[in-house]
Every structure is written in structure tokens, then in C-alpha cells.
Amino acid sequence: MLQLPLLLVPSHNHIPLNHRANDFYFGFCKNFLNVNQMKAQLLVRVDKIENHPLRYTTVEDPKPESDQVLIKVKACGVCHSNLHMIEGEFKHFGIPSKLPLIPGHEVTGVIEEVGSLAEGVQRGDKVGVQVLWKTDGICEFCLSGRENLCLKRQTTGEVVDGGFAEYMVAPADFVHHLPENLGFEESAPLFCPGITGYHAVKKAKVRFGQRVAVIGIGGVGHMTLQFAKLAGAETIAVDQSEDKLKLAKDVGADHAFVADNVEAFVEKTGKPDVAFVHAPSQKAVEQALRLVKRGGTLLMGVCGNTLVSFPEEHSIVGSVIGTRQDMNETLKLASIGKVKVDWTTYKLSEVEDVLLKLKLPKEFRLFR
Ligand SMILES: [Zn+2]
Ligand SMILES: [Zn+2]
């Protein structure tokens, strides 16, 4: 059910209000106040995507604070976790932490305005914003190289407005310059599936000669496969969809199986040292536990219940997004051609349909 990274490309130009106003005085006032408006997908309530909780509308442009930059969004990935948040499955994490909210957390674009205290960035720079929008920089997690766990972290498109819009703001310290040779569209998914897969492979301590299974070949899964391979592992892709298994092979998986067939394969040829769970399904979690060898590691990239049989000495490891250092390393590996992203583009106005595609198998899709 996981989908490849899907990208939204804003299809409307930045339209200053005064250009649209029919009334001369209204136009004059708006021009005087320099108030501009942008197109955005606004989450107005938490609800099933079929009930249209998003509104494609016009809102006031965000204004950067002194330590922030204003980014003209060029592309933004659409993620299964967008859907989880919109439908209320992340309420226990306290997100969305405000309404209305502009979702979208894997963003690329061009800096259009730089706050007076922002350093290291210039107007015209090509940058990206990952899920980690800002941290406090002073807690034990920030000080020990684990800023992704910061208790005061703010996440893009969840706690603060994100990239399903023509513009967004971000702290200058948390934007990442895009490598010269990467385009906006191919880079955007690196800012969530890319960094998530990279961090997960690091957390699972994958090393030379190990055998790993990746369950769920969606946005994150197809990146995890590539990073695990780079770390020297033999990789087994597992998914329900033949299309996804083909993608897995295309990005270098050594083996690819539908879920029903993989257990017989590992019984015969050897169980994996690490099983990554990137499919949001309890069945996938349970299968991962059956697959992984004694003393092996189950890497949880989704929520699920894990019943550990202690004599097996399994390690259960959680992994969530990554640090700015992880992001820089992910971008570097992509820029030197070590990993590649598969994506499809849609217009910003099509967010609801794209999320519906993520949610429903082809045969049940309902297009309005
Ligand atoms: Zn994401
Ligand atoms: Zn912190």
C-alpha cells in the first residue's frame, strides 16, 4: 500500500493581492501594506481524507522572522505520514499541533527573502527543508548528536506550516543547500524518505556481509534498500505489489519476494540479521519478527506491537527521521549517484487525490 514519493509542484504563480483587486483603493492599500497572498492546501480539521479535510485556498504569505528565510516552494513530497496525521492517527503524538495547518514536510525551493540575523544563506539559494524544522539546541538529545529526538523539536507541516503551498518559512540554520547537480523534484523525497532510510540503516548498524530484509517498498523502503546495499549488505525486498518488487530490483535489491513467499526463501537460504519494517501494518511487524535470525535486529520505522521472545535475543530498534548531519550525508550520497529516487509529479491542487491514492488500493480508488 505504500506509494513511491509523490511530488507536488505549485502550479500557480505568486500573485500579489493588489494585482487582483478590482477596487483601486483596495489595491492601493494592499500594495502599500505589501500584503501578498499565496495558494495553499490548508488542513482545516482532522478527518478521513474522503471527507475533504483539506481546503485548496488562498492565504496570506508567511513572513520570515529575523533568523528565518522565506522559501518559494518548487516541490514537496507527499508522504504516508501526511495521511496518518490528517486522519488523526498521530493525535497521541500531539500533531497536528495547530489548525488550520499547511501540511507537507519534504520541501525544496529557492530562498526569496533572508531575515536580518540569518546567516549562511542568500537570496536565490536552492535549498530543502526536512521534517525537523527546528530544535531547542540545548537539551541532552541536541547536545549528544541526537537532535531528531529533541523534546522541543518542531516538525515541518505538523507543528508549523509546511510545503503544500507556494511559500513557507524555515529557520536559516535548518535549511540545507541542494547539491548543484540535483533538481528540485528529485531532491524533495530525500528530505523525508531519503533521510529516514539513511538514519534507519545507521541505527540498525548494518555492516558488510550481513543479510537484511526490507518490508514495504514505498518511499522509505526503496531508499533503505539502497543505503543497506551501500553499507555492504545483501538485501531482500518484501512487498505485496509486483510493481514495488520491480522497483526494488531496479534500485539494486539482491532478492525480491511477495510477503507470502519470503519466509520459505529465508528458511532455505538463511535468515536476515536485520529486518526493516516500513509498511504500516501489524502483519508486517509480525512477519519481520518471524524472519529475523536469533540475536538479530528488528528496525521499526512504523508503529506496531512487537512481542519479543526473550530466548531469541532480538533487538527492537526505533528510528525516526534524522539529524541535520544525516541530511547532509544523504544529500551527498545522492549527489555522487550512490542512491536514486523514483517519483511522480502532481499539481498542488491535486493533494487530496494523491493522498487518496496512497490510502486506497487501485481497485477501490474514488476520484471525484
Ligand atoms: Zn514524509
Ligand atoms: Zn533539544
Image: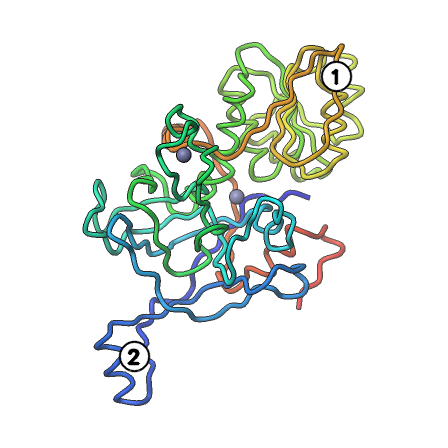
Q: Position of residue 340 (x, y in %)?
A: 47, 34
User: Residue at 20% of width from left, 47% of height from top?
Assistant: 117
Quick check: can you spot residue 166? Answer: yes
Residue at 76% from the left image edge and 54% from the top image edge = 363
Q: Residue at (32%, 46%) from the top-left corner?
A: 171
Camera-nearest residue between 104 and 337: 104
State whether label 2 is within 8 Å of ligand 1: no
In which quadrant of the rendered view does residue 191 lie?
top left
**Which of the numbered marks, if any, corresponds to residue 266?**
1
Nearer-the-camera pick, 94 or 259: 94
Tell me the distance, in whole angstroms, between the alpha carbons under discs 1 and 2. 64 Å
Residue type, numbered disc 1: Val
* 197 to the left or right of 110: right
In the image, 33: left or right of 210? Answer: left
Q: Position of residue 48 (x, y in %)?
A: 67, 59
Residue occupying the far left of the picture: 116
**In the structure shown, which secondary structural element does the residue marked by tag 2 occupy?**
helix
Task: Using the rendered image of the protein, determine whether residue 330 is visible from the camera's viewpoint.
Answer: no
Residue 302 disc label = none
Please say which color scheme the image uses.
rainbow
Residue position marked by numbered label 2 in the rendering? 19
Return the disc, 1 or 2, that comes first in the chain's sequence: 2
Helix, strand or loop for disc 1:
helix
- Which residue, as the protein is rendered here, is positioned at the far front? 139
Across and down, in percent, residue 326 comes to 41, 29
Residue at 59%, 56% (x, y): give it.
354
